[in-house]
């Protein structure tokens, strides 16, 4: 891989990671604010988070010079909160992979908490 390829993949990984966090925040905000009124939008955002995480994993695997089998895409998409831990351990090794997963879980919990608080505030004002 050339330096240009690595720079491109790192840039794409950052964008995919940021997109996943933004989509997760939007999903939590809509779930906590809208209730059952926007169920289709909730489902679409939840699916979009899974697709974005899958795309990040495909590009990140290439960045780590591993091959992400396309046959695993659908099972990964359906079970991404669990298989993300397996993926991180596979690409980064045992302990660093688990630390990466723990950091992702904590950041996800923080995003969910902030989204829930904002949703509750909007619901109280509305």
Image (cartoon, helix red, strand yellow):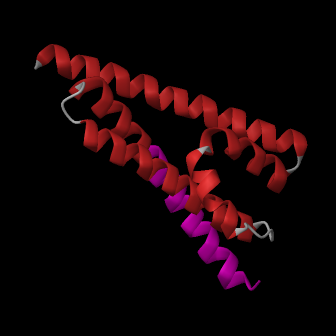
Q: Is residue 26 above or below residue 29?
A: below
Of residue 104 and residue 50, the one placed in the foreground of this image is 50
Position of 67 with respect to 53 (left or right) is: right
On whether residue 19 falls in the magenta region, the answer is yes
- Residue 110 placed where, x, y %? 50, 27
Q: Is residue 22 visible?
A: no
On whether residue 52 falls in the magenta region, the answer is no
Position of 67 with respect to 5 (left or right) is: right
Q: Is residue 75 above or below residue 107?
A: below
Quarter assignment of residue 35 = top left
Q: Is residue 77 visible?
A: yes
Quarter assignment of residue 56 = bottom right
Give me the residue at 53% from left, 27% from top.
Answer: 109
Q: Is residue 3 above or below residue 65?
A: below
Q: Is residue 21 above or below residue 90?
A: above
- Residue 26 placed where, x, y %? 34, 40
Of residue 123 and residue 39, the one placed in the foreground of this image is 39
Q: Quadrant of the N terminus?
A: bottom right
Give me the residue at 28% from left, 33% from top.
Answer: 30
Give me the residue at 68% from left, 66% from top.
Answer: 71
Query: The magenta stretch spans which residues?
Result: 1-21
């Amino acid at each position: 891989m050339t330096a240009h390829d690595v720079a491109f993949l790192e840039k794409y990984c950052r964008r995919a990671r940021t997109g996943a966090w933004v989509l997760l925040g939007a999903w939590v905000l809509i779930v906590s604010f809208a209730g059952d009124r926007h169920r289709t939008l909730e489902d679409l955002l939840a699916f979009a988070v899974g697709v974005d995480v899958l795309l990040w994993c495909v590009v990140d695997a290439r960045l780590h010079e591993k091959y992400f089998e396309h046959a695993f895409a659908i099972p990964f998409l359906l079970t991404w909160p669990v298989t993300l831990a397996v993926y991180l351990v596979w690409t980064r090794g045992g302990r660093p992979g688990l630390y990466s997963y723990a950091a992702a879980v904590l950041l996800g919990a923080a995003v969910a908490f902030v989204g829930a608080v904002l949703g509750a505030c909007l619901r109280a004002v509305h």
